[in-house]
Amino acid sequence: MQPTQTLPVIPLRNAVLFPGVSFPIAAGRPGTLHAIETAMKSPDQLVFAITQRQDVEAVTPELLHTVGTIASIGPIQRGVGGARLLLQGKTRGIAMRIQEKDGRLEAVVVEAAEMPPLDAGDTAFVALLKELKERSAELAKKLGLPDEAIANVLSEADEPGKLADLVAGYIDIPTAERQLLLETLSVEDRVRRTLVHVQRQVDVLDAQEEIKSKVQEELGDRQREMFLRQQLKAIQKELGEGEDGDDDLKGLKEKLDALVLTEDVRKEIDREWKKLQRLSRESMEAQVLRNYLELVAELPWSARSDEHLDVVEAERILDEDHYAPEGREGPDPRVPRGPPAPRAQAGGGARGAPRRRRGRAARRRRSEAPSLARPGPPSRRAPRTGAGFSSSPVLPESGRRRSRNRSRALSAASTSGSR
C-alpha cells in the first residue's frame, strides 16, 4: 500500500491538472491563498490540485472529486487581489479524506498506482501508441505549433502513460471528459480514449478550415462584384448614362414593391429583379427582362371587378352578333359563295362522251346528296371543298328540281347529237 501524506488542497474551477503538465492559475479566494502560503512553508512545496464538481465560490469537501494531481508550486506573482502561480503536475493522487482546517482545505492523499498494459510489445498496442503520436503531431501543426517544438515535446514522453497525460492536458475537451481521463488508471484505456478525442479535434479543425475557405471565397466574389459595380457606375456617369437609367429603374422598383402579391409571385419577381441588376443595360436580355417587369407592374394584381352573371343578356348578345335576322329564309348572305359549277356543253364527238358522262354523274350525285348546311351562325373561315361538300351555294328544293331537269335535258341533247 502506498504511503499517505497530508497536503493543502487547491480547488480548481473548470480545469483539470494532469501529471507531467504545467498549468497556470490565478488564486483569489482566501482559502486558496491560505493553502498556497502553507505549502510555501514546507520543503517540497506540494499541494493537492483537485477539480470542483460545481462552479461555486464557497467550496466544501463534498463538492470536490476524490481523484486529483499532486503538484508542486512554481513561480508565483503576488498582486493586490491575489496571486498568479504555476502548478507543475507530478503524480495522480486519491483523496482518502478531505477536511477543513484553519480556514483552508486539507486532504490525506495516497498516490494512485497505474495499470500498465499486459504486453507493451503487442502489435495492437504499438500501433495504437504510434497512431496517437501521429494524430497529436497533426493536431499540433493545425494549431500553429512549430515542428521542432512538437518533436521535442513528443520525444520527452517516453512512456505511454506520460504521452497520454501530456496530450490530454492540451487538447480542448470538456472538463468532465478531462476528469474521466484523469481517473482512468489503465494505461491502454487512457491511450485509446485520448486518441478518440484527438481525432475528433482534428476533424473539427478540418471542418472549420473548410467553412473558412468557403466564406473567404464567397466574400471574395462579393467584393469583386462590388468593385466591378462601382467601376461600371463610374463609367456610366462619365458617359452620362447612369442617372436617367437609375431613376427609371428606381421607379420600376417602387412600382414592384407597391404590388400586393403572394409569396411565390414576390419571390419570382425579386429573383428576376436581381437578374436585371446584374445584366448590362444595353443587352437584349436586359431589355426583354425589363419589359417583362414593367408588364408585371402594370397588371391589376389586387384589383377585383364585380361578377355579372345574366344568361338572358348573354343570349341577346349572341343572337345579335351571330344569327341572321328573323324571317330570312335560304342561305345567309354573309356566307361567302364559291365558284359556279361547270356546265356540260352540247355537241362533241364520241371521243368526249365518257368525260361528259362522268361529269354529269358527278353533278347528279352532288345535286342528289343531302345538304349539310343549316341556318346558323356564319363561319369565320372560308368554306371547305372536298368529298361530301359542294363548292356552290346550297339551293332550295325548287332550285334543286330545276337543276335536275336541266341536267336531264342537256344529257338528252348530248346523246342525240352524238348519234
Image: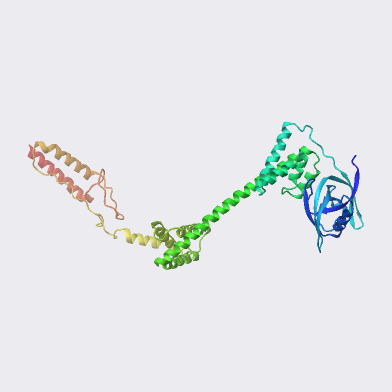
Residue 98, position in %: x, y? Answer: 89, 50
Q: Left or right: where does residue 289 sit relative to residue 333?
A: right
Q: How is the image coloured?
A: rainbow
Tell me if residue 414 comes above or below residue 78 in the rendering.
above
Q: Left or right: where does residue 247 sit relative to residue 74?
A: left
Q: Left or right: where does residue 141 sit relative to residue 352?
A: right
In this view of the protein, can residue 304 be seen by the observer?
no
Quarter of the rendering occupied by the N terminus: top right
Q: How many marks?
A: 0
Residue 103, position in %: x, y? Answer: 90, 58
**In this view of the protein, which residue sits in the foreground, 344 or 221?**
221
Tell me if residue 136 comes above or below residue 319 in the rendering.
above
Q: Residue at x 60, y 52 (%)?
A: 212
- What is the quadrant of residue 127 in the picture? top right
- What is the quadrant of residue 183 in the picture? top right
In this view of the protein, can residue 140 be seen by the observer?
yes
Tell me if residue 202 comes above or below residue 124 in the rendering.
below
Judged from this view, the residue extending furthest toward the right is 102
Q: Left or right: where does residue 210 sit relative to residue 390?
A: right
Residue 185, position in %: x, y? Answer: 81, 40
Quarter of the rendering occupied by the C terminus: top left
**In this view of the protein, which residue sits in the foreground, 39 or 357?**
39
Q: Residue at x 91, y 42 (%)?
A: 3
Residue 370, position in %: x, y? Answer: 26, 45
